[in-house]
Image (cartoon, rainbow, N blue to C red):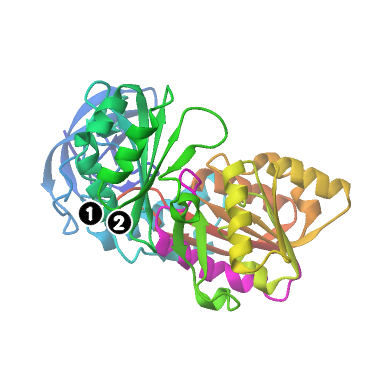
């Protein structure tokens, strides 16, 4: 059956229409291509297909660099050149906001591309294959494992450790009880930290051997249960094993070498160059304001660059490790007198602020994929001037923006950032102000 691809929809699949008018979703295509498809599954309102042949290919089609592409579930757009990826993602983002939030597409200013389309990730997380200790990602649309020797999205140092880990004798002893492994880069040091989840407490000598034998490794942590992992190994790893991330001197002029210091397992944005571009974009919106509340602060990623412009700031999060890292970094940057970080949920912090009849001229939202719906009851009464909403999920962003518009805010800017090249995922910033 021959069809023509109309567009790429959220999720990375192409949309086409069958001769009988039904909608067809098919992966691995580019808008405008004429393809021969095989129907895989039929649903009430649409059908799922697979490409049998690309009859008229797009000029933007390229040979995917990764041997796992199409099998591994991590990437969806490697068959497109990078300029086409950014164009497709921008249109997909605009359509999502229009369809789910009833927002005009011209509100979106554009999409900031990643400086590098491959090797941009500073962290990778793998599943462990029982019995062999090999590492891999989950196969597309299944729970099967794709054993992975190299990930082209990950930094080269991460891939060196990925290749070496299964052959280390200590790992062969540990792998029978290990479930997942997270490799994370400390960019300033050019070293990798390893965190593995395991069902029983490992022998210390095995963990220490991993740290000694793996290439380019700073330290190792393990997680059995509880709020934080055990480590570092070795015990004398600098800054208790925290990863070191560069941040601009201009934001922290009082510090000779400004850094973020983040322990393994605590969330950081995967593409640090794009993370810095988001910081650069949001910082001017704090100028002239005196206070800010970050309701999803994590380790202080987006709040800390604003603090030197403010009189005081508060960041909250439920992750005990993230709050400890935020406090540690705050002290390192010499900002302890201007910002506090507390372990409390966004909802609880917002309600307590409302009860105390406090307000903030600036509120930062950087929620998980579920968005901020539960905050909408009190948020309009606490945010007096501006909201900075950073989102990794366009559908929930569209929903929440619609609610905020109904609550008396207006959109000042919307800008997308390609945090995740080769995939359909992106990061977005919406700036809102009181109408």
Gap in angstroms between the C-alphas marked 1 and 2: 6 Å
Asked whether the beta carbons under mark 1 and mark 2 sit within 8 Å of each other, the answer is yes
Residue range of the region highlighted in magenta in the rendering: 263-291
Crowdedness of circle 1 by 10 Å Cα count: few (<14), some, many (20+)? many
* Residue on which disc 2 sits: 85
Image x and y of residue 101, in percent:
57, 48
| Up/down of 80 relative to 132, above or below | below
Residue 375 relative to residue 120: left or right: right
Q: Nearer the viewer, residue 89 or 166?
A: 166
Image x and y of residue 337, in percent:
73, 66
Residue 228 part of the magenta segment: no
Residue at x 53% of width, y 76% of height: 256
| Up/down of 325 relative to 178, above or below | below
Image x and y of residue 357, in percent:
89, 52
Image x and y of residue 194, in percent:
37, 43
Q: Nearer the viewer, residue 115 or 384?
A: 115
Q: Could you tell me which secondary element the residue under label 2 belongs to?
A: helix
* Residue on which disc 1 sits: 80
């Amino acid at each position: 059956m021959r069809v023509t691809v109309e567009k790429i929809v959220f999720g990375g699949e192409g949309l086409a229409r069958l001769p009988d008018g039904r909608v067809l979703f098919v992966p691995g295509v580019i808008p405008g291509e004429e393809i021969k498809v095989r129907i895989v599954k039929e649903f009430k309102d649409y059908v799922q297909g697979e490409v049998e042949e690309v009859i008229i290919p797009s000029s933007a089609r390229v040979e995917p660099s990764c041997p796992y592409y199409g099998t591994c579930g991590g990437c969806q757009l490697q068959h497109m050149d990078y300029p086409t990826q950014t164009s497709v993602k921008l249109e997909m983002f605009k359509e999502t906001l229009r369809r789910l939030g009833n927002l005009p597409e011209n509100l979106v200013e554009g999409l900031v591309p990643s400086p590098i389309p491959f090797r941009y990730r500073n962290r990778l997380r793998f599943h462990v294959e029982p019995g062999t200790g090999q590492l891999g990602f989950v196969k597309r649309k299944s729970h099967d494992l794709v054993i992975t020797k190299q990930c082209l999205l990950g930094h080269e140092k991460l891939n060196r450790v990925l290749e070496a880990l299964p052959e280390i004798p200590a790992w062969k002893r540990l792998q029978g009880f290990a479930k997942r492994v997270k490799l994370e880069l400390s960019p300033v040091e050019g070293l990798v930290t390893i965190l593995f989840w395991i069902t029983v407490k490992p022998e210390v000598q095995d963990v220490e051997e991993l740290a000694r034998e793996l290439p380019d490794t700073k330290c190792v942590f393990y997680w059995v249960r509880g709020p934080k992992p055990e480590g570092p190994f070795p015990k004398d790893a600098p800054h208790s094993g925290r990863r070191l991330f560069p941040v601009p001197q201009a934001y922290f002029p009082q510090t000779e070498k400004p850094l973020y210091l983040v322990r393994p397992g605590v969330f950081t944005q995967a593409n640090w160059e794009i993370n810095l571009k988001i910081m650069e974009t949001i910082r001017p919106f704090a100028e002239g304001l005196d206070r800010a509340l970050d309701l999803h602060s994590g380790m202080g990623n987006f709040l800390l660059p604003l603090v030197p412009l403010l009189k005081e700031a508060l960041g909250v999060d439920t992750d005990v490790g993230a709050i400890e890292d935020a406090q540690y970094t705050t002290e390192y940057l010499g900002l302890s007198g201007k910002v506090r970080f507390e372990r409390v949920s966004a909802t609880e912090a917002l309600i307590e602020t409302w009860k105390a009849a406090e307000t903030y001229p600036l509120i930062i939202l950087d929620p998980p994929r579920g968005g901020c719906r539960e905050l909408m009851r009190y948020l309009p009464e606490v945010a007096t001037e501006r909201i900075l909403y950073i989102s990794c999920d366009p559908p929930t962003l569209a929903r929440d923006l619609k609610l905020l518009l109904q609550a008396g805010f207006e959109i000042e800017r919307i800008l997308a950032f390609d945090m995740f090249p080769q995939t359909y995922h992106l990061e977005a910033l919406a700036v809102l102000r009181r109408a």
